[in-house]
Image: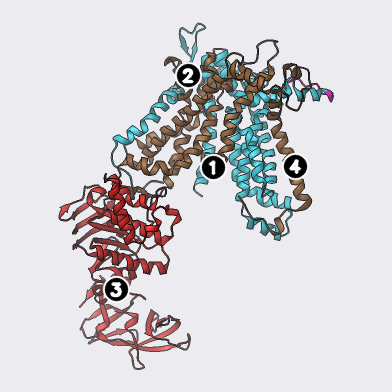
Amino acid sequence: MAREVTGMVERRGMGLWLTHLLMIIGVLVIFFPIWLAFVASTVTQPEIVHPPMPLWPGDRFIENYTAALFSGVNVPVLTMLANSMVMAIGIAVGKIVISLLSAFAIVYFRFPGRNIFFWLIFLTLMLPVEVRIVPTYEVIAGFGMLNSYSGLIFPLIASATATFLFRQFFLTIPDELAEAARVDGARPMRFFWDILLPMSRTNIAALFVILFIYGWNQYLWPLLITTDPSMNTIVMGIKQMFPSGDDVADWPVIMATSILAMVPPVVVVISMQKLFIRGLVDSEK
Amino acid sequence: MEKRVTFKGWLLPLCLIAPQVVISAVFFFYPAGQAVWQSLFIPDPFGLSSRFVGLGNFEYLLGDPYYRSAFVTTAIFSTLVTLTAMVPALFLAVLADRLVKSAGVYRTLLIWPYAVAPAVAGVLWLFMFNTRVGVVAWYLGQLGYDWNHVLNEGEAMGLVVVASSWGRISYNFLFFFAALQAVPRSIIEAAAIDGARFWRRFFTIVLPLLSPTTFFLLVVNVVYAFFETFGVIHTITSGGPQQATTILVYKVFSDGFVGQDLGSSAAQSVILLVVVGLLTVVQFKFVEKRVHY
Amino acid sequence: MATVDLDNIKKRFGTTEVIKGVSLSVQDGEFIVIVGPSGCGKSTLLRMVAGLETITEGELRINGVRANDREPMDRDIAMVFQNYALYPHMSVAQNMGYGLKIAGLPKPEIAAKVAEAAKLLQLTDLLDRKPKQLSGGQRQRVAMGRAIVREPSVFLFDEPLSNLDAKLRVQMRLEIRELQSKLGITSLYVTHDQVEAMTMADRMIVMNAGVTEQIGTPLDVYERPETLFAAQFIGSPSMNVIKAEGRDGAFYLGGMVLPNPTGVEGPVMLGLRPEHLVPDPEGPIEMQVLLAEPLGANTLLHGKLATGTGFTASLPGVHRVMSGEGALRLTIEARNMHLFDAETGRRLG
């Protein structure tokens, strides 16, 4: 990243400041919705419903967030946060585990049906859950998995992106490493644990970030299968906080909830920025 | 691309691959098959029995003005989202690329919206443009513009497009920025020595070099606009007004779950399946090429 | 300590036969070099001995016991790979001890064996490093160390020096040979470098296109190459080979006449090593020198014969022959002439 820019293509003086200025304006515009939500989560309801609302945070931070976390509208936001956490981690871990295992099988073994399985798994790349919602809903209902974590998690694990990524990565590992392990006496699972898994650490971490956000940000699926408010995830739960009809929404609490809904994924993304970018670029190419 | 050495045996690999195969079968292939199957039937109003109608559901759909308008809406929506998400991202990436030292700081700031769920993004934008309390709507009112996306179809479309594109700007920015960083300095310097000024260099040298990334993002953003914007639309407009923001995925949901028209919903799923299939083939062809470089 | 026997070993990938029947008996403690150009099947042969490739046909015996169907770990072998194949996430000590750990040895014993091998290889200070913190030569030593700690009956080396620079290669060559004779472990060593083969081998197998061209000591192969291929592959610069006609007790090649003590008649291939040519104003061989490469100790003269055939001579010391002016007459002792059948390329006489 630190690259020496020299000579003719270097930017100096006016050009540089103009670039900074444009960049700052860009960042401010992009940031504005989040800022506004944060401000709204720190002021009183009257301040919001009599526009224009202030553009600088108020002093109701603690009250509003306490209200959201412990009472919420239908259900305490804390419960929804916990549900989201379980779902996001469940999806990330579940997908990583099954993908690691199947990628290992596909890359390091020749067995009957290998190609068929590979293509079957590959086909699942093609179909987002949004497209098959009705029948998938019926499957989950048939298993009695409505309003359950397994119902939230399993259908979203059935996708091959992670398998594909691990397959690509395993293929870049020199053959000699597996041979050396064989000569050293390692049986397949030993090789998997001792060599392959530690070598995949960064890939696993990067994928975890991507999948965590993917799981956390799910909307349609939890909307369908969690009819019990205590099973709501936070991302879908926000919409449920809007009153039906003409009642006025409790904006400070809703906005506090919105901020709470974005904190975990934002923290994950910012704190693991390098891994995240690597994972993103890898998983998409 | 095969490994030279492999481990022996077939039972172990079958066990290893089993979890994924079982989950895919139960939660993916079976429902997908069901969608195809159901698309051939019309259930009676009480849901007790269903009648085989062959391609009747499809015929009906393709003749249905609402469905056709959903198609048009989806096309407009995804085009607008793709443009709105990519052009500013490219612009910001070009700026950031010129700011060598501080680029990392800007990048960190710009990543945020990517982490925000589309549904939450919908709530944030709804809040800004809310007809009663929205700050932006209020200021527009002060300027004499009466914003009302609840009634005005164009404004509704505009709002869902911007709300959907917002988080994607971060995503596209990351890719464009990475691609720009990968442009060899020597090429830029050679162009500079050849006397090309910045914008000239950008359009004749840099942009063509970015074309693989641009094409890739084009496909990915279209896929996003098709399938992942449900949350935005559901939170902001619920498909209205007058179905002006009802895209195909939203219609599968509203017909299937709200309208309980399972046959039609299933047929719509199958049509979408074909659309995704085509997009995936395009994407994969491209990915394949890139992987082999 | 062990003997290794290869009995008409063959390998087919699908229908293509890449090893066409190799037989060899390796004595206990012997250092065998398998040498040949890339694609000749030498690595495949080694990998079959290691158990990394299945043997299509023939029998492999280690210590007299059939080993065809044994897993690599059960063959009592250790292998050094071309790219070293060190586990990148493990320290030097962990890399070296991994095989012992799998074998279930107690930790103190592993540590002791690793320390001993490390001392032998001067790796003691590097035991905690990761492979990527090591230089090429150090990685090479770790790969050796990994092989040593297991105290195998057979060492297998797959072009272990080809990723090193020239100077280091010479040094490691010596180290490997020294170590091997100190430990007395039977070794099979694959290389494409004929210098390595010459300097390291007790005996070498020259392979070409899946076939054994010759098995013998380095000097055997150098002095009495069995085939044209072996003759040209071993020795640097490579042997001159000229088509000649044996007639009336002499060899006729172009306008030149060489003595023929063997009495072979008819078309033959005549092999003359560049270093065996001696300048002689009366000599029967006349070459047109086009390029001189002074190497200091000797000078390589590249040119061609009157027939147009390329020809190289290596003369001791410095020779200031300018290209263009250089018509040079040479002679060669009859005992240094190699004769090969023009059809089969096999040695005559």
Amino acid, disc 4? Leu
Residue C33, image x, y percentages: 28, 65
The answer to whether mark 2 and mark 3 are in CB contact below 8 A is no
Chain with cyan colouring: B
Three-letter code for the amino acid on which mark 1 is drawn:
Arg
Q: Are marks 2 and 1 on the same chain?
A: yes
Q: Nearer the viewer, residue B14 or B274?
A: B14
Mark 1 surroundings within 10 Å by alpha-carbon count, few (fewer than 14), some (14 through 19), many (20 or more): some
What chain is tagged by disc 4? A
Q: Position of residue C346 (x, y in %)?
A: 24, 72
* Residue occupying the point 63% across, 48% down: B180
Q: Badge 4: few (under 14), some or many (20 or more) residues near its Cα, within 10 Å?
A: some
Is tag 1's residue or tag 4's residue first in the polypeptide sequence? 4
* Residue hosting label 4: A22
Part of the protein shown in magenta: B142-153
Q: Amino acid at mark 3?
A: Ala
Q: Which residue is mark 2?
A: A135
- Quadrant of res C7: bottom left
Q: How many marks?
A: 4
Q: Is residue C262 left or right of residue B57?
A: left
Q: Secondary structure at mark 3?
A: helix
Q: Which residue is mark 1?
A: A278
Measure how far apart labels 2 and 3 are at the Cα level.
74 Å
How packed mark 3 is, by other alpha carbons closer than 10 Å (few <14, some 14-19, many 20 or more), is: many
In the image, farthest residue toward the left: C64
**Callout 2 amino acid:** Pro
Which chain identifier belongs to the red chain?
A: C
Tell me what residue is drawn at x 36 percent, y 57 percent: C142
Q: Is residue A205 above or below residue B202?
A: above
Q: Tell me which chain the residue with mark 2 is part of.
A: A
